[in-house]
Amino acid sequence: MGVALRDILEDYRQDVDPGTLRGAIAVDAFNALYQFLTIIRQPDGTPLMDGEGRITSHLSGLFFRNINFLESGMRPVYVFDGAPPDLKAETVAKRREVRDAAGERWKEALVRGDTEEAYRQARQSARIDDAIIASSERLLDLMGIPWCVAPSEGEAQAAYMAMQGDVSAAASQDYDALLFGAPSLVRNLTVSGKRRFRGRTVVVRPERIELAAVLNGLSLDREQLVEIAILVGTDFNPGIRGVGAKTALKIVGKGEFEKVLEEKAPEFDPEPVRSFFLNPPVSTDYRLEWGEADREGIIGMLCDEYAFSTGRVEAALEKIGVRSGQRTLDAWF
DNA sequence: CGTACGTA
DNA sequence: TACGTACGG
């Protein structure tokens, strides 16, 4: 879900010229996988599956998106979430509840033959499990795309990599990466293109939000932006009832963060959340090396194991210059 | 989400 | 060529 800062951040969205996305970018892996798992479905909500009923929506999304990323000169590194912090326990439990309930309503809607409701509920029931993580990591390895597992939140790790200058931006739909200090956040990277909203075709383009521009424009420092998030509510605290981003901006601007908390939530200690955003657990031990895609390995996995069409997979690989016989040719030199 | 292929 | 729709797994 992330933080609801949209109302104060929307003025700072910049259109991204696709050509400027060349080079290393840290992609929030869980965020991307959720998007693939929610979007890549049949009209009744059924995800793509192989003959054994294993979900393959995420593999389709990852494979074809990455082909396009690589083709355009982008070098993605996928950052997976590690163990969620204790602060997130309530959010995690609540999400599980929502997912499970949606799964039930999906089944019921299917029985009723209510396809639209089935689709809606199916999307909300999307879940990332160990098989989805393991198969994603394996496909990335075969594509020569680096990935790492964050000690805690993937967005914090992606932000750190951007702060180090190892990647030019963190890519996620959520604004949290900015709170974690990412100098640049790219949204809509894994959901760009034409999409239909209520029958209308809308073009979704990647957008960039620069942390410096936000802080300058709103006359804040990062600590104050984190305070705004805490008032609105984050994955790590419930927020103050009735306080949205604009109200929170005013409160923090007047220096009344502590005062409002004392009034409205005297029991709540914001310190652990504040320090989690300002100084999150991250790993300094990661490697960013992009290698050649393993054509036979990819075909073996996607086509032989997961029933992808060989023609489609080969055509996609062709786009990034991975052809049959390449390895045998290399062997001559 | 993506590609493939129909139609104007 | 541009766009809508079917299908992918």
Image (spheres, coloured by chain):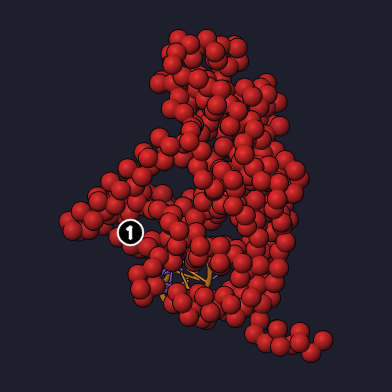
Chain colours: A red, B orange, C purple
Across and down, in percent, residue A235 comes to 48, 35
Residue beneath disc 1: A45
Mark 1 residue element: loop
Q: Residue furthest left?
A: A112
- Name which residue type carries label 1: Gly
Across and down, in percent, residue A144 comes to 66, 67
Task: Report the side of A164 relative to C2 (left or right).
Answer: right
In this rendering, the answer to whether A266 lies above or below A38 is: above
Q: Quadrant of residue A282?
A: top right
Across and down, in percent, residue A112 comes to 17, 56
Q: Residue at x 53, y 22 (%)?
A: A270
Q: Residue at x 72, y 61 (%)?
A: A289
Q: Nearer the viewer, residue A230 or A203?
A: A230
| Neighbour tally class for label 1: few under 14, some 14-19, many 20 plus, Cα within 10 Å | many
Quadrant into which the C terminus of chain A falls:
bottom right
Q: Residue at x 34, y 47 (%)?
A: A99
Q: Nearer the viewer, residue A21 or A300?
A: A300
Say if residue A68 shows up in the picture: no
Task: Report the side of A126 relative to A106 (left or right).
Answer: right
Q: Residue at x 41, y 20 (%)?
A: A242
Q: Nearer the viewer, residue A273 or A9?
A: A273
